[in-house]
Image: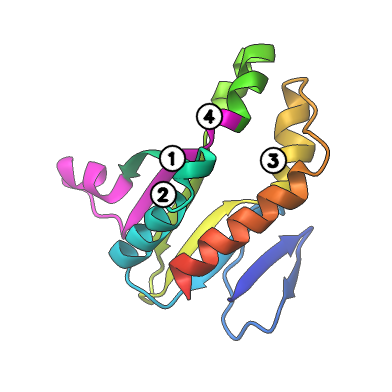
Amino acid sequence: MERVFRWIGIVVLAGIPEIALAADPGIITVSSRYSVEETIERFVGSILANSDQGWMVFTRLDHAAAADKYGLKLLPRTVVVFGNPRLGTSNMVKAPTLGIDLPLKALVWQDDQGKVWLSYNSAPYLTTYLYPRHGVEAAAGATDALARFLDAATGRATQ
């Protein structure tokens, strides 16, 4: 799985022959060997395969389709909104503003060269920045568990 991280202007590559820069160190961008549509379907399927654990897909936001309605051109850009109410609801009860940042989102997009990518917020970013900004502390082990889940879901979607 190709991954790209940008940290304070330094690009760290994990055996990656292609480069895409994330605007923030909390964003993970993974290349996909599939089309945008197939990557989305594979990602959605991967999330829904864990529905017995509470994972669900809330919606998809197709930015390119919205732009097209106004005669504007935009390469494919679709946000998949997903989450786990079993894990997130109690925190939203404590901090209603957490609803601004949750549920989770993944962006499937195509670059100018036709390459397809899947981008999402990293688990450490979510648990050490987003949760604390709302006054909520992530449960012990949450970062590692979420990272494993996101890695598996994005791996199935892109490889």
Asked if residue 117 is positioned above or below residue 87 in the image, the reply reads below
Near-viewer residue (122 or 25)? 122
Marker disc for residue 21: none
Q: How is the image coloured?
A: rainbow
> If you read the primary sequence from the N terminus, does the residue marked by circle 4 or circle 2 appear first?
2
Marker disc for residue 85: 4
> If you read the primary sequence from the N terminus, does the residue marked by circle 2 or circle 3 appear first?
2
Near-viewer residue (34 or 46)? 46
Residue mark closest to the camera, 2 vs 3: 2
Residue mark closest to the camera, 3 vs 4: 4
Marker disc for residue 126: 3
State the separation of the CA atoms marked 2 and 3.
21 Å
Q: Quadrant of residue 70?
A: top left
Pointer 1 residue: 56
Q: Which residues are magenta?
A: 63-86
Mark 2 and mark 1 in contact? Answer it, CB < 8 Å: yes
At mark 4, the secondary structure is helix
The kind of residue tagged 2 is: Leu
At mark 1, the secondary structure is strand
Left or right? Give the position of 81 relative to 12. Answer: left
Left or right? Give the position of 20 relative to 73. Answer: right
Marker disc for residue 48: 2
